[in-house]
Amino acid sequence: MGRIPGQALWPQAFDTAELACIRQAVGEREWAALYQQNPVPLSGNLFHTHMLGVQEALPAASGPAVRRWDLAATRQSGSNNPDWTVGVKMHHLPDGRFVVADITRLRGDPAQVEAALLATAARDGVGVEIVLPQDPGQAGVAQARYLTGRLAGYKVRCVRETGDKATRAAPFAAQVNAGNVLLLRAPWVHAFMEELAAFPAATHDDQVDAAAGAFAALAEAHPLPRFGADFLARI
């Protein structure tokens, strides 16, 4: 077409600056597919970890928080390399950014996983919503019902996961890549960033799953504003 890549097709409606804001908001994968008509496969570097900020403490006004769990139930023994049970605690700051405040993870049997959930809930307090995955089928329903009962006194939500892992992680990756995600300085930071950098080709992705789920839970509670009539009239 003789058009420079990135040049606005309809500058009267969306100029270059506005398109740049949209690109930052949706992320590179969605931008390539929706705005360049050039869908690309998810093949590493979904998360630009250099965009993550690390700070010493939560701001005084830290906003709502959730603890999202990704559950496994196999102890490590010998040379086996089982999945981790991971609980990611995330805050949604008043300025719109997100903070990963804590990551708890273990490899244990069902009794040890249950004990970790209860201990972490007590440490977080009743102000932190607990989000649990619910696997399809009767066994998943029974597990969700049992754990919800054991966590009586806390706000608990069970969610069914749909779509592949990379698709579920993409909205969280867009916020990471836009510089809207912070981490609290802690011993878990290095392992978390390594897993993000290797996703979706990493051996384990339990921390990514839990973090993406925590972000989704907070984003659902505080949805993006709707487009106004004046904006829609320009399309």
Image: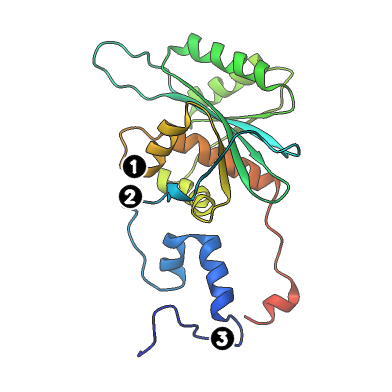
Residue in view at x 43 percent, y 38 percent = 193
Q: Are marks 1 and 2 in contact (CB under 8 Å)?
A: yes
Secondary structure, mark 3, is loop
> Which residue was labeled with disc 1?
198
Give the residue number, with chain letter if any, for mark 2: 44
Does 199 appear above or below 104? below
Give the quadrant of residue 25. Answer: bottom right
The residue under label 3 is 11
> Which label belongs to residue 67?
none
Q: Is residue 146 visible?
A: no
Residue type, mark 1 in image: Ala
CB atoms of marks 3 and 1 within 8 Å: no
Q: Nearer the viewer, residue 32 or 148?
A: 32
Q: Amino acid at mark 2?
A: Gly
Q: Label 3, label 1: how many angstroms apart (C-alpha)?
A: 38 Å
Callout 2: 10 Å neighbours few (<14), some, many (20+)? some
